[in-house]
Image (cartoon, rainbow, N blue to C red):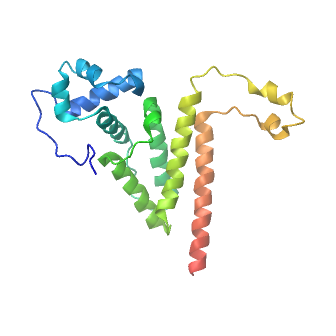
Amino acid sequence: MDTVWSRPRKAPRQTLTLERIVAEAVSLLDEEGADRLTMRRLADRLDTGSTTLYWHVKTKGDVLDLALDAIFGEVSLPGQASGDWRGPVRELISGWRAALLRHPWSATILDRPLMGPNALERTEFLYRALAAAGFAAPKAAAYSLSNYVMGSVVMQVTLQDRDQEDTGEFLRERADRYPSLAEHGLDHEWDATFDEGLGYLLAGMEQARNGATARLD
């Protein structure tokens, strides 16, 4: 498996380090997005030649993997759970969402393998917390949570910058066909909707966990 994480780390050339490359890449991505990132533009921002840059990273894909993992490094690891497992898990998932939203470009590359040390450390925490809580299949539980946070981030990043249209009037005019939508609407406040939905997901997982525990007794 040849990835940026599996190759031996090379010694710095002059003052250019991998940490500096990653920091500048994140800044460039924050300013202009993933589509604008090229190795030449990154080398120019670092005031170095492409040859020196390639000494540390082989491809643009390497840079994206490193930058995305740096974003995961912004997610604080919760303390050890002393009671309800849902507290630390909610804290981790909410922190993950917040980090991704601070860097909207990250939502466009979440299809990349999350094999960096920061991502793996936080995934390890999630698996460990779920296993300790009694989930027989922590992978399935973690998969549900990660899909929820990534899906919500992709939707928010995709839609929030568009001109917001009032859908309420459109739906009310068609209330005979869409009565529930006319009553409740499609518009929402992103943070509140995410928190409420996460609460539903965690409550359902707790109910499933209790049911599995009861069957074993």
Quadrant containing the C terminus in the rendered view = bottom right
Instruction: Give the image location of residue 2, x and y in percent.
Output: 26, 47
Instruction: Give the image location of residue 106, x and y in percent.
Output: 43, 34
Counting the numbered discs, the total is: 0
For the point 62% across and 64% down, which residue is it?
A: 207
Instruction: Give the image location of residue 33, x and y in percent.
Output: 42, 25
Is residue 125 shown to the viewer in this render?
yes
Q: Quadrant of residue 164?
A: top right
In the displayed image of the protein, which residue is found farthest to the right? Answer: 176
Left or right side of 176 for 30? left
Q: Is residue 136 above or below residue 10?
A: below
Viewer-side residue, 62 vs 151: 62
For the point 58% across and 60% down, which residue is it?
A: 205
Viewer-side residue, 1 vs 9: 1
Left or right side of 176 for 212? left
Left or right side of 217 for 23? left
Left or right side of 200 for 118? left
Instruction: Give the image location of residue 184, x and y in percent.
Output: 77, 37
For the point 52% across and 37% down, which residue is it?
A: 153
Viewer-side residue, 76 vs 4: 4
Is residue 84 shown to the viewer in this render?
no
In the displayed image of the protein, which residue is found farthest to the bottom? Answer: 217
Q: Is residue 27 above or below residue 143?
A: above
